[in-house]
């Protein structure tokens, strides 16, 4: 059974930093691209970042580019999201998601974690 | 803001058929990129419902179907059941980013 377990969320002041982790199990982690998707309270889904199978390619939404960094450790089957320069509008539940598909422009998110809440407030 | 527009809400009686539209443009759905659909029950993570425009993952009932034409797509739920009450999102690709629809809340009357 595929499991994605996020951790690292919490309350942080504006301008602060936070590191999210996503522990993956139940599939061969290094075979799949991975992503982070967030959902602000009471709002819709927003794609945040993606990383290729071996970590060589990374992609970011314009809203987080230059502030967030995605990475992965295949030896630990773990996905990370380093967040810096946090703003109130970054407050959201952050979901880790596994991609399925063959081409970057056709991928869907076939497995999701339960999410971790990040609150940016003074 | 999202580039894929969905109606905020749709409703139907048990057993009825409801449809949810997802309207995009020439830079996403109209460019030929696949459309995928997700169901999000209250307080839970999203679940992949339809991938590649009209394919159901294993375990998804065949009451759920989808189609795509031009710059739009749609999700249909036939034989509506109380457990279908949830938020539904379409998703595609646009200008090097993954985009979600605005979301539609389905209510069972």
Image: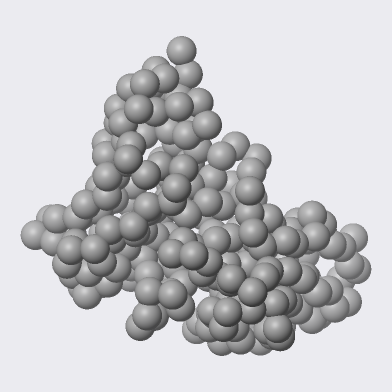
At x 57%, y 83%, the residue is: B32
Question: Residue placed farthest to the left in the image?
Answer: A75
Q: Is residue B78 above or below residue A95?
A: below
Residue positioned 64% across, 79% down in the render: B30
Task: Give the percent coordinates (x, y) of residue A2.
Answer: 33, 67
Q: Is residue A101 above or below residue B95?
A: below
Between A57 and B81, the one nearer to me in the picture:
A57
Q: Quadrant of the C terminus of chain B?
A: bottom right
Residue A4 screen position, x and y as percent = 33, 57
Q: Residue furthest top?
A: A122
Residue A79 left/right relative to B16: left
Please tell me in which quadrant of the rendered image residue B88 appears. bottom right
Way the structure is coloured: one colour
Horizontal and vertical percent position of residue B95: 49, 65
Image point 18% across, 63% down: which residue?
A56
Whether residue A43 is visible, yes or no, is yes
State the residue in front, A117 or A99.
A99
Quarter of the image for residue B101 reads bottom right
Question: What count of labels does the image hold?
Answer: 0
Asked whether, in this view, residue A33 is left or right of residue A115, the answer is left
- Whole-percent x, y for residue A99 in the image: 38, 70
Q: From the viewer's perspective, tell me whether residue A2 is left or right of residue B10.
A: left
Decide if residue B87 is in sight here: no
Residue at (35, 83) in percent of width and height: A102
Name above or below for residue B102 compared with residue A10: below
């Amino acid at each position: 059974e595929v499991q994605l377990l996020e951790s690292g969320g919490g309350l942080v002041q504006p301008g602060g930093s936070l590191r999210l982790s996503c522990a993956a199990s139940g599939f061969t982690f290094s075979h799949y691209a991975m992503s982070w998707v967030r959902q602000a309270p009471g709002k819709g889904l927003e794609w945040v970042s993606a990383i290729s199978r071996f970590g060589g390619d990374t992609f970011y939404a314009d809203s987080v580019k230059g502030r967030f960094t995605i990475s992965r450790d295949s030896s630990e089957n773990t996905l990370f999201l380093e967040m810096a320069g946090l703003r109130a509008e970054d407050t959201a539940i952050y979901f880790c998601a596994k991609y399925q598909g063959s081409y970057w422009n056709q991928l869907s998110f076939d497995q999701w974690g339960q999410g971790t809440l990040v609150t940016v407030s003074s | 803001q999202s580039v894929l527009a969905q109606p905020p809400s749709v409703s139907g009686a048990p057993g009825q058929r409801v449809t949810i539209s997802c309207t995009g443009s020439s830079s996403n759905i109209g460019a030929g990129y696949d459309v995928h659909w997700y169901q999000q029950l209250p307080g839970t993570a999203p679940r992949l419902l339809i991938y590649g425009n009209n394919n159901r993952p294993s375990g998804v009932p065949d009451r759920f179907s989808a189609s795509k034409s031009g710059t739009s797509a749609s999700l249909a739920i036939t034989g509506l059941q109380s457990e279908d009450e949830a938020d539904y999102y379409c998703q595609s690709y646009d200008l090097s980013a993954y985009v979600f629809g605005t979301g539609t809340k389905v209510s069972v009357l």
